[in-house]
Image: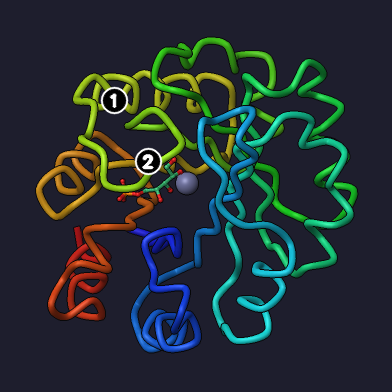
Amino acid sequence: MIVSPSILSADFGRLDQDIEMINRSQAGWIHCDVMDGVFVPNISFGFPVIEAVARRTSKPLDVHLMIVNPQNYISQVRDCGAAIMNVHQEACVHLHRTVEAIKAAGMKAAVTLNPATPVETLTDIVADLDMVLLMSVNPGFGGQKFITRTYDKIRRLRKLIDENGSHALIQVDGGVNLETGLAVAQAGADSVVAGSAVFKASDPVDYIEKLAVL
Ligand code: DX5
Ligand code: ZN
């Protein structure tokens, strides 16, 4: 399991120490949640913070854009050091064009689906994607409860990926802890994002290791 700890739940007053913790852990990536207060009802952080994280970390940056018009920021996301640029299907009118532009900029292209968006909406683009992220909470906040219908979506997405000859990874984001993470792994996901569960743990490095072996 590729674990992508979300720094949304980190202590921004000592972000360097929290990034050092992630560097020491078995995390595969670092998940950066960008929120604009329009696509989601919350505002988080933007490019200066992502750049600072990139300077401090040895892990690839997994940038999840919960913003309208993400196609306007592709070069900025690339320039601040992202390895994966993740846009919401619901935010992209011309999703194919946006995915092609992300790949042309040298990043992995990922697309996120909100809980109410069916996986079948990706039928005609899944073969072009490096990753699909299924939201298991409504995006905007850390610390929410996992929506259990996601397990069935993971299984349906796996089928869609296989049927279309896609190499896309499946990532799940929201309410992931050791219990929901185990069920997510059993349903066929390749990666989990975890924010509050990791940062509230008494030993976050150990918690990330436990998620990684699920
Ligand atoms: C939610 C964000 C998530 C969030 C996860 O809108 O996309 O990445 O940080 O937080 P937890 O793991 O606490 O649900
Ligand atoms: Zn996220």
Q: Which of the 4 image quadrants contains residue 123?
A: top right
Residue positioned 56% across, 41% down in the render? 131
What is the quadrant of the N terminus in the image? bottom left
The residue singled out by tag 2 in the image is 172
| Depicted 67 relative to depicted 16: above or below | above
Q: What kind of element bears circle 2?
A: strand
In this view, the residue in front, 138 or 1, is 138
Q: Hey, which quadrant is residue 195 in on the image? A: bottom left
Q: Nearer the viewer, residue 108 or 39?
A: 39
Q: Position of residue 32 (x, y in %)?
A: 55, 58
The amino acid on which the numbered mark 1 sits, given as a three-letter code, is Thr
82 sits left or right of 8 in the view: right
Residue 142 drawn at (x, y percent): 34, 47
| Residue position for label 1 | 150
Q: Earlier in the sequence, mark 1 or mark 2?
A: 1
**Residue nearer the viewer, 175 or 209:** 175
- What residue is drawn where x is 87% and y is 39%? 72
